[in-house]
Image (cartoon, helix red, strand yellow):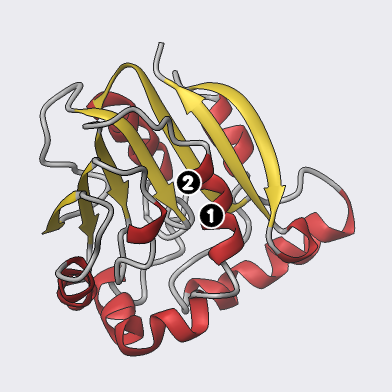
Amino acid sequence: MNNKKILSKSMEKIYSFYSPFYDLIFGKTLQPGRELAFSYLNEHPHQRILEIGVGTGITFNLYPKQSYIVGIDISPKMIERAKKRAAVASNGNKISLYVMDACNLEFEDESFDAVISPYVITTVKDPLKLCHEMYRVSKVGGQIIIVNHSKSSHGLRSKFEEWLSPFFARAGFVTDLDVMELVASTEIQVQKVIDCNIFNLHKVIVGVKK
């Protein structure tokens, strides 16, 4: 239940390589899932929200108004692009961006009202630790929202995802991680799960820290 297969290249190098054309490849195709995930964010003003894997800042226009957004990414080049987008972002939001490892968050316990992670959990070497880190930095009662592909639990699709995973690992993510099972094994209390994107290949997991 981990991504130890992602060893050939560091995520920083892979996603820095993607940075100039990330929006073109992973933008519109995955945007419906992002939009759905962000639609579940509470709309209380002045929330402090952490986005793990902020990338090029493609989500900035999806945040509730008057939010304090903290975005992290492993790739400095992604953060450079996100800063350019943040400079023209509106909605009255404050945005701070940092280069940071998602599995070793440099924030104090209970720092955020909400944590959202779009398409990250299958890109890290230790997805269980990432879940623990999201839980740790969330306030009690805080939202934890994940959108990601999750391996099917049975059938032909499951075997196909296992077969494809070593190939996709070279591209920076795996397809054989059961994200649903992983999250359920943690202290995150799952409130709802919604299918999204083409062929319902991805899921939005809406959880909370109790």
Does 108 sit above or below residue 177? above
Does 89 sit above or below residue 102? below
Name the residue nearer the viewer: 87 or 92. 92
Q: Using the rendered image of the protein, determine whether residue 1 is visible from the camera's viewpoint.
A: no
Please provide percent x and percent y for residue 138: 28, 25
Quadrant hosting residue 66: top left
Amino acid of disc 2: Phe
What is the CA distance from the residue labelled 2 to the residue labelled 1? Answer: 5 Å
Does 115 sit above or below residue 161? above
Mark 1 crowd level (few <14, some 14–19, many ≥20, 10 Å Cα): some
Amino acid of disc 1: Glu
Tag shown at residue 35: 1
Identity of the residue drawn at 47% across and 57% down: 119
Please provide percent x and percent y for residue 43: 39, 32
Apparent side of residue 135 relative to residue 127 in the rendered image (left or right): left
Q: Secondary structure at mark 2?
A: helix
Tag shown at residue 103: none
Please provide percent x and percent y for residue 86: 19, 66
Identity of the residue drawn at 72% across and 47% down: 195
Quarter of the figure that contains the N terminus? top right
Please provide percent x and percent y for residue 160: 78, 66
Q: How many marks?
A: 2
Residue with the mark numbered 2: 38
